Amino acid sequence: MKIVSNSSPIIALSKIKRLDLIKDLFTSVYISEEVHREVYKVRKENSPTWIQVVKVKDRMAVAALDAIVDRGEAETIILAKEKDINLALMDDRKGINIARRMNLDPIRTTTLIGIAYKKGLLSDLKEELFNLRDKGYWITDYYIEQIEPVQ
């Protein structure tokens, strides 16, 4: 499966040293030039070689969405449409709502961690979510406590 990612999931997963989960779950990972700038140019780091940086072609569509969501989310959504990829990794509620209206299937960072757990890539789901929260990702105790262990 292929996925296009926004910056927040990459940053969040990097903070907990679990960026590899994206690589392990998807055959191809794409980010826009804006997302690359937000994540790697600002932090002065190199992106992993398995993340493909792609220039978004439809600048008018990006500009239209940029009035509603930030540029990284706008480019993520338009890039997914241009590459005919249904999955978009993003966390912002507005971006998720726009992605859904554009017939994309947005996946939050917490959902990705849950998928990784179900596929046996993680041993303790709650521990990973607490770790994510400790690094600044907003998750309530209630959300984490409602998670039932997989039998």
Image (cartoon, rainbow, N blue to C red):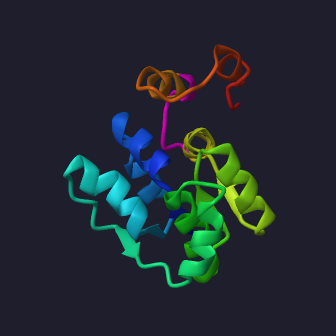
Estimate the x, y position of residue 106 in percent, counting from the top left: 67, 56
Rendered residue at 35%/62% (across/down): 36
Q: Which residues are magenta?
A: 120-126
Estimate the x, y position of residue 150 in percent, counting from the top left: 69, 32
Q: Is residue 127 depicted above or below 89 in this figure? A: above
Q: Quadrant of residue 88?
A: bottom right
Estimate the x, y position of residue 47 in percent, counting from the top left: 27, 60
Q: Is residue 121 depicted above or below 125 in this figure? A: below
Rendered residue at 50%/21% (across/down): 130
Q: Nearer the viewer, residue 104 or 77?
A: 77
Q: Nearer the viewer, residue 70 or 36?
A: 70
Q: Is residue 44 depicted above or below 53 in this figure? A: above
Q: Quadrant of the N terminus?
A: bottom right
Estimate the x, y position of residue 26 in percent, counting from the top left: 51, 63
Could you tell me what secondary structure mostly forms the magenta stretch?
loop
Q: Is residue 97 depicted above or below 49 in this figure? A: above
Please give left or right for residue 77 compared with residue 131 in the image.
right
Give the mark count: 0
Rendered residue at 53%/68% (across/down): 75
Please give left or right for residue 96 compared with residue 138 in the image.
right
Please give left or right for residue 52 compared with residue 114 in the image.
left
Q: Quadrant of the C terminus?
A: top right
- Is residue 123 located in the magenta-colored stretch of the structure? yes
- Is residue 121 located in the magenta-colored stretch of the structure? yes
